[in-house]
Image (spheres, grey):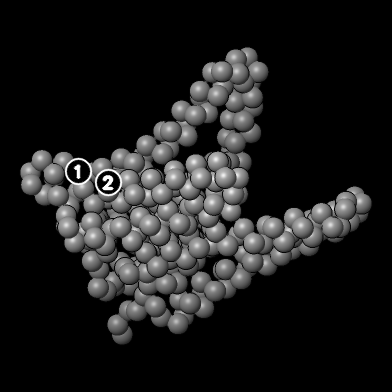
């Protein structure tokens, strides 16, 4: 029997997991709503807040759909749908899948078919690796937070510098992945410029939307900056690849 990354049984398994997550979300939403009523909060404000939150979930949802489409070329729809509906993001999932495929001698984006063993290996790498964050939060989260608070109380400036440094360090790991093939440019292989150009386009679009939102007071631009910059970057990858790849 030939393995199919879009097998109906995989859709069922992923659908059950996503349904559980949705049920939890609805449960907590109802509990929060009832608690707000018990506290005597203004119902008009509650409805307006809920309506606003519902509208602005469209922006991150668009980014998730784009991410699923990106990963579905190699992995089918069920696995990316499941991963990005529970814990995950495009940057992490792409890197994890690419590394797993590279270890098996495959090239991300150029896989025509996966065996069941390869599929399970990739799914395990994508899933198990990110669990470390979930386990670390209850183990060291409180101590880390208390340490940050102590540092900020002792010296607010250094506390802000430390927080910014941690964030920059995390971003640097992903930026390094963008430049990992850049050295080939010095040997006449311009394909390494493609991810750099794509990142530049996305950054410019994000910056333009952020500045316009700030100057014009258009909050909707800031809320939709992420999916728009993702779409712009992915769209630019087509001509850049044709030109440089």
Classify 10 Å Cα crowding around label 2: few (below 14), some (14-19), many (20 and above): some
Q: Is residue 241 left or right of residue 125?
A: left
Q: How many marks?
A: 2
For the residues labelled 1 and 2, say whether their Cβ atoms are less than 8 Å apart.
yes
- Pointer 1 or 2: first along the chain: 1
Residue ID at (28%, 58%)? 237
With respect to residue 39, does 170 lie above or below? Answer: above
Residue 166: percent from left, percent from top = 47, 31
Secondary structure beneath dot 1 equals: helix
Q: Which residue is mark 1?
A: 182
Q: Is residue 237 left or right of residue 227?
A: left
Q: Residue furthest front?
A: 216
Residue at 47% of width from left, 66% of height from top? Answer: 65
The residue that appears at 50% across and 63% down in the rendered structure is 62
Q: Quadrant of residue 137?
A: top right
x, y percent for residue 153: 65, 18
* Residue 130 percent location from the top left of the image: 46, 50
Residue 78: image x %, image y %? Answer: 45, 72
**Rendered-image quadrant of the C terminus:** bottom left
Residue 153 can be seen, yes or no? yes
Q: Residue farthest to the left?
A: 187
Q: Residue at x 48, y 48 (%)?
A: 209
* Secondary structure of the residue carrying numbered label 2: helix
In the image, which is nearer the foreground, mark 1 or mark 2? 2
Label 1: how many residues lie within 10 Å, few (<14), some (14-19) or many (20+)?
A: some
Left or right of 242 on screen, residue 22: right
Q: Quadrant of residue 38?
A: bottom right
Q: Can the viewer see residue 100 in this picture? A: no
Q: Nearer the viewer, residue 80 or 133?
A: 80
Q: Residue at label 2?
A: 196
Comparing 240 with 168, the one in front is 240
Image quadrant holding the N terminus, namely bottom left
């Amino acid at each position: 029997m030939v393995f199919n990354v879009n097998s109906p049984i995989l859709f069922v398994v992923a659908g059950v997991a996503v349904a559980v997550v949705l049920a939890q979300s609805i449960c907590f939403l109802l509990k929060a709503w009832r608690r707000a009523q018990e506290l005597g909060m203004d119902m008009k404000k509650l409805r307006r807040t809920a309506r606003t939150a519902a509208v602005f979930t469209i922006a991150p949802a668009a980014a998730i759909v784009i991410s699923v489409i990106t990963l579905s070329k190699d992995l089918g729809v069920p696995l990316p749908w499941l991963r990005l509906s529970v814990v995950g993001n495009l940057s992490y999932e792409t890197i994890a899948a690419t590394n797993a495929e590279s270890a098996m001698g495959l090239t991300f984006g150029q896989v025509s078919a996966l065996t069941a063993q390869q599929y399970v290996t990739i799914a395990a790498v994508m899933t198990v690796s990110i669990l470390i964050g979930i386990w670390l939060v209850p183990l060291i989260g409180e101590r880390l937070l208390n340490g940050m608070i102590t540092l900020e109380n002792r010296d607010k400036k250094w506390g802000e510098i430390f927080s910014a440094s941690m964030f920059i360090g995390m971003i640097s790991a992903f930026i390094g992945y963008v430049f990992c093939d850049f050295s080939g440019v010095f040997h006449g292989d311009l394909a390494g410029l493609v991810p750099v150009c794509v990142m530049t386009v996305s950054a410019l679009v994000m910056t333009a939307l952020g500045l316009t939102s700030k100057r014009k007071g258009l909050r909707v631009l800031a809320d939709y900056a992420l999916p728009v910059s993702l779409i712009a970057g992915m769209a630019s990858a087509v001509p850049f690849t044709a030109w440089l790849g």
